[in-house]
Amino acid sequence: MRNVFDQYQQPENRLTHAVVSTLDADRRLLRPFLRSLGFTSVPLAARLQLVEQQLPGEIESGLDEERGLPDACAYDDDGFAALIESKVQASVRVGQLRRHLKTAEHHGYPGAQLVVISVDEPKVALPQGVRHVHWKDVYCWFARRTDSSWARRLREYMEVFEARMIARDYAIRGTLTMFNGLRFDDDHPYTYAEGKRLLRLLGDELRGRADLKKLGVDPEGKGRSAITGRGEGRVWDHLALREARRAKMLTDHPHVTLSIGRDSADVGVTVPNGIRGGFRTRLATLGPDRFAEFITTLEKSLRPAVDSSRDAKPLIYVLQRHYRTQRSIPDEDARLTVDLGTAVRGSRRGVKYQPEWFDTIYSVLVHKRSNLQLGAHVRFSYACPKVRSRKAVDLFARAAIGLKPMLDLALGRF
């Protein structure tokens, strides 16, 4: 069934229509929303008219933008006019904004105020008095209005809208919404589109964190060029490292990975088969006893993140696979995944002590005869309340920092 908000083809018009429809349906939201955008001297909602692609005195809407029509306008009969220009894919143009103000003045509103809502920061200086607001701030404002069913509908629509845009690889530079947790369950099952949206939001949150810069994460680094996994039940991306800036391929260097799937989400460090710099030689020189010391160091480092999230698991794995063709999905030949708790006597999570698993992993890596990938990660459960909230960002960051011994091992620093 078509959503009541889907009335236009252009993304800008769809979002504007959704916001205007929400404000018109629940007039309690109109005045405080306009104030949140920075409009001043806003009249009571009962005195305001709300129109799309139209100005006071215009009879028809949907006219050519050269006539200077904003995407939305709220006005009264006493000279107040709040103009809204919406941008999603298109860039902000100063000439267009000036036409909006000039047209409003021509219609008897010389004191009209104008706000631009866009995904990212405008690349041009805005005319004097024109303000800018991010779409994600609009999303957050409506998300806080838990007393309004229409606000909830708009928030849900924006989430679905963004997921569709990302799944279809539309050129959106920033984000429309904010990361509010991973809330997949029986009532709201995982989908590829929603997983892809949340993966992008979570990655953006983590790349900008100062504590992850200390780990070596490059805040300017880019993730995968295309997030695949439509039929695999899981999507993943990576956080680029500063040390990998000169790497020609992702598989030349270890990387921090983020993964969101049907039943759980992970943050980990992957040591690819093709890692450069003599990793295999260093591993053989390390010896089994020193490797066992590495395992206990890694487990201890991850303990704060694991202990702070219900049902979280610290895991290490070694994976053997082969590719039938250069572009094919790899065939998995063998996988050994071990809970790091098996390296510790008296684990508080009830995991039994069995350190021989790590002897096996070490032996397989040292006697490598095939395509082998080593990795460590923390698996988070969607049943954890923190994972289902914005606190998930802190959990993922803490786990990534806890994975530092894995990076040290891969880069010859352990």
Image (spheres, grey):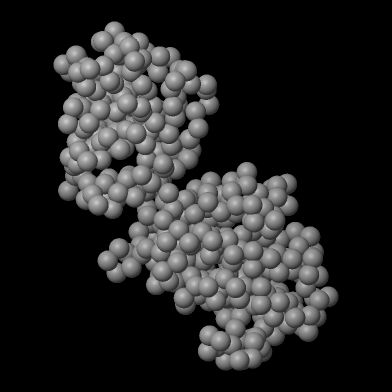
Residue at 33%, 18% (x, y): give it: 112
Residue at 55%, 74% (x, y): give it: 306
Image check: 246 left or right of 22? right
Residue at 62%, 43% (x, y): give it: 220
Q: State the image coordinates of residue 263 (x, y, percent, origin top left).
A: 40, 70
Q: Is residue 198 above or below residue 9?
A: below
Q: How many marks?
A: 0
The image quarter in which residue 296 lies: bottom right
Q: Is residue 55 visible?
A: yes
Q: Is residue 334 above or below residue 276?
A: below
Quadrant location, the C terminus:
bottom right
Residue in the foreground of this view, choosing between 182 and 248: 182
Q: Is residue 54 above or below residue 170?
A: above
Q: Is residue 193 above or below residue 76?
A: below
Residue at 38%, 33% (x, y): give it: 37
Which residue is the extreme one toward the right? 285
Residue in the foreground of this view, choosing between 27 and 256: 27
Q: State the image coordinates of residue 354 (x, y, percent, origin top left).
A: 62, 91
Q: State the image coordinates of residue 211 (x, y, percent, origin top left).
A: 64, 56
